[in-house]
Image (cartoon, grey):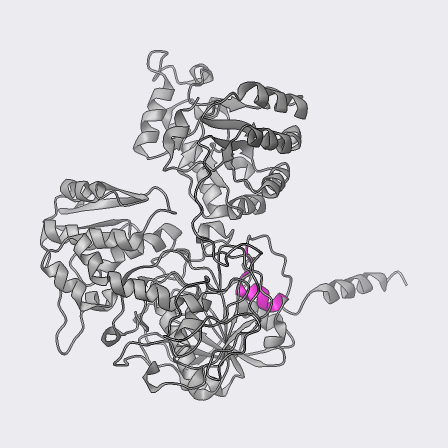
Amino acid sequence: MKKIIPFLILALIFCMIPPGGSSANTAAIQLGSDVLFEQFHSLIEGKKVGLLTNQTGVNSQGTSTIDQLRRDRSVTLAALIAPEYGLDGKTPASQEVTPSIHPVYGIPVYDWNAAKKEPSDVFEHVDVLLVDLQDTGARTNPYITNLYDCLSAAAKQGKPVIVLDRPNPLGGQLVDGPVLEAPLRSSIGPDTLPLAHGMTIGELALFFNRNIGADLTVVPMQGYTRAMLYQETGLAWTPNAPQLGTLPAVFDSLATGIADGTSLLVADDFSWIGGEGIDANRFADALNASLLPGVVFLPDTRNGAGGVKLQIMNVHLYNPVKTGMYILAYARQLGHFPVPQSTDTEISLLDRTMGAAKISEALAQEKSPQDLEALYADQLAAFKELRKPYLIYGDEPYLPLLPIKSKAAAVPQAGAKGEANPVQPSDKPVQTGTKPAQPGTAPATPGAKPAQSGATPAPTAVKPAQPAAKPPAGKPAVKPPVAKPATDKVAYLTFDDGPSAVTPHVLDTLKKFGIKATFFIVGRNVPGHEAILKRTVAEGHAIGGHTYSHDYSIVYKTKEAFFADLEKGNQLIEKASGIKPTLFRYPGGSTNTVSHKYQDAKQYSLANPVMNAIKAEAANRHYIFIDWNVTNGDARSNKYTAASAIANIKQQVKNQKEIVILMHDSSTKSPTAQALPEIITFLKSKGYRFDVIRPDHPTVSTVK
């Protein structure tokens, strides 16, 4: 009997594993692939599945969708389809790839390069085609052309398509740039989209399908909101192209990569752009004088080419498309580079990128950036209305109840790439789950009305997969901008030295009160607490650096030692959260005297202390330090109590307009977490509102 027990335990463990493998999820959201295997597995059960994917097709835990399907005994993975750059993302885009048999899985692998015709024979092997690809948020990304072609081919073959949704790295609110004109459709522009479309790949599928009529199902994400940037999802970034290895590169590629086809040069992961004949200082001055949000420009001449280095200061404010238009306009005015023009026989790469020939024509005339923006303002406004019915996500975290289905009544002949006329919506807006379109917005088609819960759709309507969920009573489905409260008193709650086991208790309290705070992270505490850090970011809190070691003897020895330690910590923060901090807090504060004890006596003195050198270098690196003017006293001892922490706050808070409160969430600071509810209640009674610290509000760095 004793010999049998281990086998019984093993059998029990296997019985507990779902068909797609373990689905434990520590990310802030669940991807479409997570939701498919956990909620809607019946969509693929018993079917032969073809999968359009590459190295980005992984779930929130990093497990590839290929592996999930291979492990699933109820599903047959019958074919793989690779987009540009191949299954591993490393195949040169120009390399010809012929259909082959996978050396390990023994199944067909097809190359579905966006610039070529889709393979029709893939549908001979499958019952359903699954799509799991990470988009960049740009119209020029070839993967969305793969998606368009996939839907077109599936509609012709009568095969269903399931799209597993993923975040738009740029978020769902950045919608800007020239809108593609139908004659300029190509492999880098399959439909009438602006340069930044602000849609997830699932929403794009619904948008494309308005005129294609494929049997389409979108498996939405759980917990995603329209305002989320990729850095806030808690997901690790998997580069979807060799040149887009980091999230800043994804953003900057829309600012500088749109110069494709001109003589301008781009380097440093799209963060540098320049050209011959351009004065770097005048270039930087013109751009900085434009006060473009969230970014500054540093003059940088390379090999005779005058250029600028882009420094993202606030990713939430940064608009790379707008930035790119200003870069192009000023570069043309300063360097007079030749602007390529399309001919009757060939469309220039610049025109294909812009999607409209009028941009290159205006550049040739050295028009201002404002003139460029005016050229597409009307079409952009029309697109924003056109896309509304196909949006899935709103301001509140999305909760999938059912998959989202879409199938038009007929397939218009003009729906394929190269159609002569702009695509128009053909029927009622798609009902997209728990966050319906904003009430009162104009429908995309004259006479069409947004679908309401319980309403009977017209015969030609796209049928919703689930009834429209009513928004909470008294609240619109999509919230309008909320005005700040009348009070001019603001409290910034800050927590140093985490993450630790105490941090989740702090986060729970903040969530209960609906309050956001700022956490200054010690890098050595990140390993083993990555999930806590991801949760912190996902729940809308701000994070900053607090060095790696927090060891005065290390960080305050020299200027170089300080930044080596700070950067080491920031790298761990970025690796875990996707966010590279620009905020930081000095161990001991910016006016500390303890640094005098540890500074290198050969380089520094009381008259010329190490802190002066560190502060000057921090300014050069565009770091913003944050001090405090109120503390709960938990830094003085580990023997403090919740009552003493509350008393300290009450004693120091008078009627200041702006307070930054220093607290700690390291492993020995449980009383801080216990005191937090009463501290918040007290501050509210004093008329304070709460906010996170942002780099664009640096006055809080001088409150001490």
Q: Toward the viewer: 497 or 483?
A: 483
Q: Is residue 351 visible?
A: yes
Q: Is residue 411 left or right of residue 31?
A: left
| In the image, residue 630 above or below residue 152 | above
Q: Is residue 521 visible?
A: no
Residue 662, image x, y percentages: 52, 27
Q: State yes or no: residue 30 in magenta.
A: yes
Q: Specify start and end residues of the magenta stretch as a single range.
A: 29-38
| In the image, residue 399 above or below residue 457 | above
Residue 550, image x, y percentages: 50, 28
Q: Toward the viewer: 458 or 564?
A: 458
Q: Toward the viewer: 104 or 505?
A: 505
> How many dots with numbers?
0
Residue 528, image x, y percentages: 59, 43
Q: Residue at x 62, y 39 (%)?
A: 509
Q: Is residue 369 left or right of residue 5?
A: left
Residue 451, image x, y percentages: 50, 72
| In the image, residue 462 above or below residue 677 | below
Q: State yes or no: residue 370 in magenta.
A: no
Q: Residue at x 45, y 65 (%)?
A: 391
- Res 74 → quadrant: bottom right
Q: Toward the viewer: 234 or 474?
A: 474
Q: Residue at x 54, y 23 (%)?
A: 631
Please identify the residue farthest to the right as the structure is shown.
Answer: 1
Considering the whole magenta stretch, tell me its main secondary structure: helix
Q: Residue at x 46, y 30 (%)?
A: 489
**Viewport quadrant of the C terminus:** top left
